[in-house]
Image: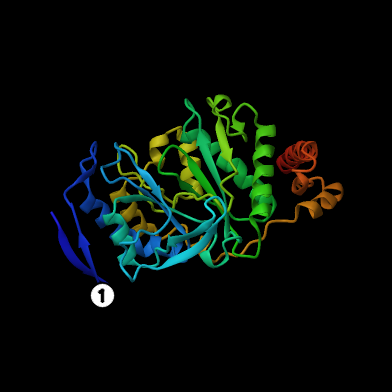
């Protein structure tokens, strides 16, 4: 079934609306479009101005997919793009900017089921507006173990006076975002994120790994710090995922994370499209602070001086020199773990 509709004054031709793209759930392309229309008021602000990588499944989630970065030539003239130089391809890539509802509907009609935006705005692609930690469980670990790691991460952020916000990946794991919205660079956020991943690994070696080698991840949670990179993207908040059922990368409260851990129930953090729309109608956009909250990551080298005078401070010093002196960061992280444990013990007394 094909249809031509008008969305905010733009004409769109929709095709194959009855085509089932989630066979196990009987979820059609029309239902995908309907979901994105309903979630658009909450989702679009998180996409505006960001280079968008699309993951397209023209024959459904059980069939072959492909990533698409460059805007297709057949796009409507009103679809906005951003030219960004690709060192790997040695050419300019024209990324789509999903700035409005017509563009989102057009993408859904192309079976762009998953949307993966940059952590930076296209106008300054080297300046991320947020830092992200992707917590990926290695079976038999699941999202319950991710909840424990997430709470440890939150505790570290609180030491720095930073607020953090969790969301499900919509797949197996959990993702923790730290809004910045202040001048920074990827080499800073990536180094900082790597240091925290190493800190957690040092303090909880039976549960956490910071290395992406799959052979060491069995039964543990991989804290993926490497997503903080100009050349990588993370699935958008409210994006559908190409799983067996139409699950969504969904913002959750820290109370929900704690409840899932307490009850050891991974099902408490699985949300499908219809439920996500209802959650937003009831709870609003839990990720709204990511758009405006201004925070700064502490300077790692200055923390080294603080740590000597303040034992409760987590020292992540020398991380900035990781490439030149690979042993030095490990020593810094080891000291950081000791200081964090001392700080916890002090608060319990």
Image location (x, y in percent) of residue 279: 35, 54
80 lies left or right of 331? left
**Residue that sits furthest to the left in the current view:** 1
Q: Is residue 103 visible?
A: yes
**Residue that sits furthest to the front in the current view:** 90
Q: Residue at (50%, 29%) from the top-left corner?
A: 138
Tag count: 1
Q: Nearer the viewer, residue 31 or 88?
A: 88
Image location (x, y in percent) of residue 302: 81, 55
* Quadrant (top left/top right/bottom left/bottom right) for the C terminus: top right
* 102 w.r.t. 21: above or below: below
Q: Is residue 262 visible?
A: no
88 lies left or right of 194? left
Image location (x, y in percent) of residue 329: 76, 40
Q: How is the image coloured?
A: rainbow
When asked about the image quadrant of residue 283, the answer is bottom left
Which class describes the residues within 10 Å of circle 1: few (<14), some (14-19), or many (20+)? Answer: few
Q: Residue at (18%, 52%) from the top-left corner?
A: 16
340 lies left or right of 212? right
Q: Nearer the viewer, residue 238 or 203?
A: 238
Image location (x, y in percent) of residue 244: 31, 37
Secondary element under disc 1, as helix, strand or loop, is loop
* Quadrant (top left/top right/bottom left/bottom right) for the N terminus: bottom left
When asked about the image quadrant of residue 170, the answer is top left
Q: Give the residue pinned by disc 1.
A: 9
* 283 w.r.t. 245: above or below: below
Q: Residue at (19%, 46%) from the top-left corner?
A: 19
* 180 w.r.t. 146: above or below: below
Q: Residue at (69%, 33%) from the top-left corner?
A: 202
């Amino acid at each position: 079934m094909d249809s031509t509709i008008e969305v905010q004054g733009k004409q769109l031709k929709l095709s194959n609306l009855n085509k089932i793209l989630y066979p196990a759930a009987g979820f059609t392309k029309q239902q995908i479009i309907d979901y994105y229309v309903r979630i658009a008021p909450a989702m679009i602000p998180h996409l505006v101005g960001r280079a968008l990588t699309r993951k397209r499944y023209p024959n459904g989630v059980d069939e072959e997919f492909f990533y698409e970065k460059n805007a297709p030539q057949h796009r409507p003239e009103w679809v906005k793009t951003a030219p960004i130089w690709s060192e790997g391809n040695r050419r300019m890539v024209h990324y789509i900017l999903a700035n409005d509802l017509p563009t989102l509907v057009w993408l859904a009609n192309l079976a762009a089921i998953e949307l993966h935006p940059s952590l930076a705005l296209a106008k300054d692609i080297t300046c991320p507006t947020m830092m992200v930690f992707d917590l990926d469980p290695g079976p038999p670990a699941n999202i319950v173990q991710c909840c424990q790691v997430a709470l440890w991460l939150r505790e570290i952020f609180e030491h720095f006076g930073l607020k953090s916000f969790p969301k499900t990946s919509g797949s197996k794991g959990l993702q923790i975002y730290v809004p910045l919205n202040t001048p920074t660079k990827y080499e800073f956020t990536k180094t900082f994120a790597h240091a925290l991943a190493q800190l957690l690994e040092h303090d909880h070696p039976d549960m956490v790994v910071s290395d992406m080698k799959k052979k060491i991840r069995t039964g543990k949670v991989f804290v993926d710090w490497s997503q903080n990179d100009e050349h990588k993207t993370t699935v958008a908040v409210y994006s559908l995922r190409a799983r067996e059922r139409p699950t969504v990368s969904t913002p959750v409260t820290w109370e929900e994370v704690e409840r899932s851990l307490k009850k050891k129930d991974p099902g408490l953090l699985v949300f499908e499209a219809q439920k996500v729309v209802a959650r937003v109608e009831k709870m609003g956009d839990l990720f709204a602070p990511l758009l405006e909250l201004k925070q700064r990551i502490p300077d790692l080298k200055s923390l080294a001086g603080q740590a000597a005078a303040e034992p409760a401070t987590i020292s992540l010093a020398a991380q900035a020199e990781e490439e030149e002196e690979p042993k030095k960061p490990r020593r810094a992280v080891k000291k950081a773990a000791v200081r964090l444990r001392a700080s916890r013990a002090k608060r319990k007394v």
